[in-house]
Image (cartoon, rainbow, N blue to C red):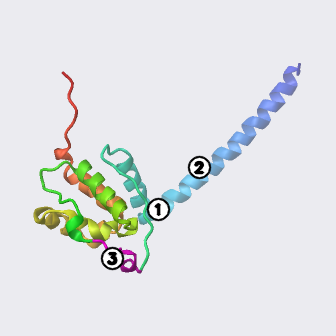
């Protein structure tokens, strides 16, 4: 067993290491506070908002500049399920994704095709967004679920 003097020496070294690490962390925090990137802050805020939202759906599609070449010749907009303003958004979302999978449509085309699955009243809502808010499938799904979350039927117990 180590004598008290050796134990104190070990503890002193551990405290010294922890002090150095603490100073390093504090310097990193200070650097972040001095030069916060607005895009980094917005990105972090978006992550926090999405992680605390129960209707959040996350999917990260890949995008290609030549999207039209990915569209199958058998695809027809009439094959899409139409969402009415009183429908449950979860069911429409599932139906839309299932139809796209059956047609072999690349997920990167979902943001472009999705508005075609909406009734005109819902399309008006969709097209009221700036283009930057409807570029990713994740953003579209989040906005859609948030807008129509009042239509989600919850289970009740008797």
* Lower position in the chain sequence, tag 2 or tag 3: 2
Observer-nearest of 147 and 97? 97
Q: Which mark is residue 100?
A: none
Closer to the camera, 22 or 66? 66
Label 2 neighbourhood size at 10 Å, few (<14), some (14-19), many (20+)? few
**Residue 155 appears at what percent x and percent y?**
22, 32
Residue 69 forms part of the magenta stretch: yes
Q: Residue 130 occupies which quadrant of the picture?
A: bottom left
Residue under label 3, please give it: 73
Q: Would residue 74 be found to the left or right of residue 22 on screen?
A: left
Considering every residue shown, the one lying at the far front of the view is: 74
Which residue does the image show at 11% across and 66% down from the upper left?
A: 120
Q: What distance separates the C-alpha of mark 2 from that of mark 1? A: 15 Å
Majority secondary structure of the magenta segment? loop
**Residue at horizontal 20%, vertical 65%?**
126
Residues under labels 2 and 3: Cα distance?
Answer: 58 Å
Q: Work out whether 127 lies above or below 32.
A: below
Q: Residue at x 35, y 50 (%)?
A: 49
**Secondary structure of the residue carrying numbered label 1:** loop
155 magenta-colored: no
Image quadrant where residue 134 sits: bottom left
On the picture, is 33 further left or further right than 93? right
Q: Earlier in the sequence, mark 3 or mark 1?
A: 1
Q: Quadrant of the N terminus?
A: top right
Dot 2 or dot 1: first in sequence order is 2
Magenta extent? 66-75
Foreground label between 2 and 1: 1
Which residue, given by chain and number where applicable, does mark 1 sit on?
Answer: 36
Task: Please give the label number shown on residue 26.
Answer: 2
The quarter of the displayed image where residue 141 is located: bottom left
Q: Could you say which is closer to the camera, residue 155 or residue 102?
A: 102
- The front one of 150 and 66 is 66
């Amino acid at each position: 067993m180590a004598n008290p003097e050796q134990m104190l020496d070990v503890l002193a070294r551990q405290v010294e290491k922890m002090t150095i690490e603490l100073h390093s962390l504090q310097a990193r925090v200070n650097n972040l506070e001095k030069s916060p990137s607005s895009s980094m802050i917005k990105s972090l805020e978006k992550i926090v908002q999405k992680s605390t939202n129960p209707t959040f759906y996350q999917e990260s599609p890949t995008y290609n500049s030549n999207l039209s070449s990915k569209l199958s010749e058998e695809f027809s907009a009439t094959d899409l399920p139409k969402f009415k303003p009183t429908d449950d958004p979860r069911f429409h979302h599932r139906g839309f994704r299932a139809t796209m999978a059956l047609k072999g449509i690349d997920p990167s085309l979902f943001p472009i095709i999705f508005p075609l699955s909406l009734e005109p009243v819902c399309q008006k809502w969709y097209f009221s967004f700036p283009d930057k808010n409807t570029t990713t499938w994740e953003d579209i799904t989040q906005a859609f679920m948030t807008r129509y979350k009042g239509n989600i039927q919850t289970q009740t117990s008797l």
